[in-house]
């Protein structure tokens, strides 16, 4: 098995859109409503990631992880602009593979508006 970390390109968006959705579904099942999670659309996320990467640098670092030639994760990170928001912490988001046998996925963004009711 070969793991490669490299810059994220627009060509990675289709594969990563699906990884992104599967990661959310695996991570937030039971915390967010099934209706919301089941409605997540890999193609829609691929478009968002394609636009995000095509938009240019803007001080971001966008990386993708490939395992044996398949996209299994990505990270996008940037530092907060110190001259406009000195108290803002650096921001980042990450998602990792949900392939069978892999660790559970994580993502730092969590839309609480779709949280599942507490029991």
Image: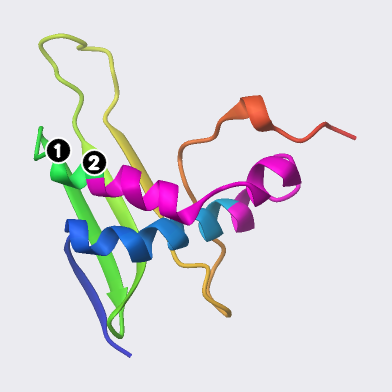
**Can residue 14 be found in the magenta stretch?**
no
Q: Secondary structure at mark 2?
A: helix
Real-space CA distance between mark 2 and mark 1, rounded to the nearest whole angstrom: 5 Å
Range covered by the magenta-colored residues: 25-50
Q: Vertical placement of 86 versus 65: above or below?
A: above
Place of residue 57 in the rendered image (x, y in percent of width and height, measured from the top left): 9, 39
Question: Split into 4 quadrants, where in the image is the C terminus?
Answer: top right
**Mark 2 near mark 1, Cβ–Cβ under 8 Å?**
yes
In the picture, the disc for residue 13 is none
Quarter-wise, where is residue 2 in the image?
bottom left
The residue at the point 15 percent across, 9 percent down is 84
Place of residue 102 in the rendered image (x, y in percent of width and height, measured from the top left): 53, 75
Residue 18 seen: yes
Quarter-wise, where is residue 116 in the image?
top right
Quarter-wise, where is residue 77 in the image?
top left
On the rendered structure, is 118 left or right of 23?
Answer: right
On the rendered structure, is 90 left or right of 112?
Answer: left
In the picture, the disc for residue 52 is 2
According to the picture, the residue beneath numbered tag 1 turns out to be: 55
The residue at the point 20 percent across, 12 percent down is 86
């Amino acid at each position: 098995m070969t793991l490669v970390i490299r810059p994220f390109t627009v060509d990675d968006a289709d594969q990563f859109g699906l990884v992104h959705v599967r990661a959310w579904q695996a991570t937030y099942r039971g915390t967010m409503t099934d209706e919301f999670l089941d409605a997540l659309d890999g193609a829609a996320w691929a478009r968002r990631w394609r636009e995000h990467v095509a938009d240019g640098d803007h001080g971001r670092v966008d990386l993708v992880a490939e395992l044996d030639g398949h996209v299994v994760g990505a990270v996008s990170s940037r530092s907060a602009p110190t001259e406009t928001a000195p108290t803002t912490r650096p921001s980042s988001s990450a998602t990792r593979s949900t392939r069978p046998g892999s660790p559970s996925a994580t993502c730092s963004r969590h839309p609480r508006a779709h949280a599942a009711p507490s029991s």
